[in-house]
């Protein structure tokens, strides 16, 4: 009986890519697996057939040979076990488990004999003043971290000694365990995926290849940086185990509240209390700005409480831009207190001669109230 075409068995076109092949194989293997079909000889036969087809097509060289010569490419020399359950079958099944279960079942990150463990990323919280965010600042920070051991140069081995091939995994960095029809691969528990073990551990770092140290780093805080910005310093995190690459350092910047200014993006806001007479008659005063100068504020005649005056270009610089925000000064009009007798007499005289034009807002408000009360009567 002639064997079925491998592409037909998997239900894919001859032009199917690796992803399509794996997806088709995964579905069929799960469908016909003997554990799901106990005692079903047809399902077992189909499972072997599907595994044999995928084993041939997942390998680029085998697939090229099959596309050219068909099944004849694999005749003569297959060994005692069929392709579906031979030495390569465990590799086929591990592809499924890589996709389905990840590293938990032996897939995911496969480590070779020289696998190196990357160090952990670190976080540092940096609090700065608003003036530092305005002009930019160079800040020095102390970061407790792990650095490569100077004694063993990060290898973890005692100077003058070396490494030997791991006897548990024979240098593969992973071990296999048979479970029924499956062969599960896991990281070697003895060498932790490196494929080799050290003859003697370094006495200073106890074989880790790294040690604890507080590092002093310089950070350039750019102009216009905003609260919550994250700065990434590549390779400034923890050193990896036994010569592995270092992780990254992430600096999270927060800006302290300012006693005068509130920030809104690139704009600055502040409040200024002025006397009632200044608001009525007009005047001027100065406010400080973050660039070290003083800005002169012209108070218009008849300024109302809450009115804002805009100062162009007196705000914050925009991060990585030549643009600058504005400053907004809100007027808080202060009502006179602790009046002398003469001051009270003058205000009473003013109140006696005041007209609706002097207080248009309050006059309009009380007119509305009067109208409401009259309609309700």
Image (cartoon, rainbow, N blue to C red):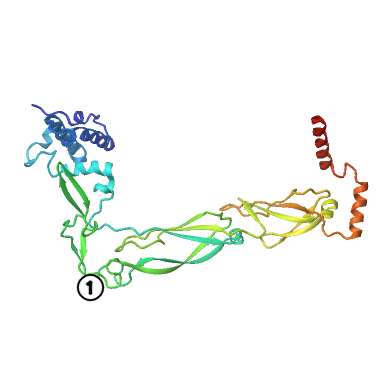
As displayed, is residue 99 above or below residue 287? Answer: above
Q: Residue at x 72, y 51 (%)?
A: 330
Which quadrant would the N terminus be assigned to in this image? Answer: top left
As displayed, is residue 374 above or below residue 119? Answer: above
Which quadrant would the C terminus be assigned to in this image? Answer: top right
Total number of numbered discs in the rendering: 1
**In the depicted view, which residue is nearer to us: 333 or 234?**
333
Q: Going by the picture, which residue comes out furthest to the top?
A: 1
Element under disc 1 = loop
Residue 175: x %, y % from top left: 18, 52
Q: Quick check: 284 left or right of 115?
A: right
Would you call the spot at circle 1 few (<14 residues within 10 Å), some (14-19), or many (20 or more)?
few
Q: Residue at x 33, y 58 (%)?
A: 118
Residue 44, by quadrant, is top left
Q: Which residue is mark 1?
A: 160
As displayed, is residue 199 above or below residue 39? Answer: below
Residue 4: x %, y % from top left: 14, 28
Q: Quick check: 35 left or right of 141?
A: left
Residue 68: x %, y % from top left: 17, 33
Residue 207, by quadrant, is bottom left
Q: Quick check: 12 left or right of 77?
A: right
Residue 231: x %, y % from top left: 48, 56
């Amino acid at each position: 009986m002639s064997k079925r075409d491998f592409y037909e068995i998997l239900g894919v076109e001859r032009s199917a890519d690796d992803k399509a092949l794996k997806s088709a194989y995964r579905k069929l293997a799960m469908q016909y697996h003997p554990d799901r079909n106990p005692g079903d000889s047809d399902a077992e036969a189909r499972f072997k057939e599907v595994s044999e087809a995928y084993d041939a097509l997942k390998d680029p060289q085998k697939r090229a040979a099959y596309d050219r010569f068909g099944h004849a490419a694999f005749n003569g020399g297959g060994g005692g076990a069929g392709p579906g359950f031979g030495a390569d079958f465990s590799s086929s099944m591990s592809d499924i488990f890589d996709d389905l279960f990840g590293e938990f079942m032996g897939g995911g990150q496969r480590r070779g004999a020289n696998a190196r463990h990357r160090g952990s990323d670190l976080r540092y919280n940096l609090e700065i003043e608003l003036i530092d965010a305005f002009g930019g600042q160079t800040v020095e920070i102390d970061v407790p971290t792990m650095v490569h051991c100077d004694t063993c140069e990060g290898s973890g081995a005692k100077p003058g000694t070396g490494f030997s091939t791991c006897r548990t995994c024979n240098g593969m960095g992973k071990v296999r365990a048979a479970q029924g029809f499956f062969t599960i691969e896991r990281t070697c528990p003895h060498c932790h995926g490196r494929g080799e073990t050290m003859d003697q551990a370094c006495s200073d770092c106890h074989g880790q290849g790294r040690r604890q140290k507080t590092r002093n780093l310089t950070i350039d805080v750019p102009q216009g940086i905003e609260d919550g910005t994250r700065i990434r310093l590549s390779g400034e995190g923890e050193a990896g185990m036994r010569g592995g690459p270092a992780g990254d350092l992430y600096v999270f910047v927060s800006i302290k509240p300012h006693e005068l200014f509130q920030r809104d993006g690139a704009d600055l806001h502040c409040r200024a209390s002025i006397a009632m007479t200044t608001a009525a008659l007009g005047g001027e005063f100065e406010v400080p700005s973050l660039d070290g100068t003083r800005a002169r504020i012209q108070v218009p005649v008849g300024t109302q409480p809450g009115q804002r005056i805009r100062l162009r270009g007196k705000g914050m610089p925009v991060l990585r831009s030549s643009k600058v925000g504005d400053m907004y000064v809100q007027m808080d009009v202060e009502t006179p207190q602790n009046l002398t007798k003469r001051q009270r007499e003058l205000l009473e005289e003013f109140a006696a001669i005041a007209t609706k034009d002097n207080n248009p807002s309050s006059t309009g408000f009380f007119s509305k109230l009067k109208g409401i009360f009259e309609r309700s009567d």
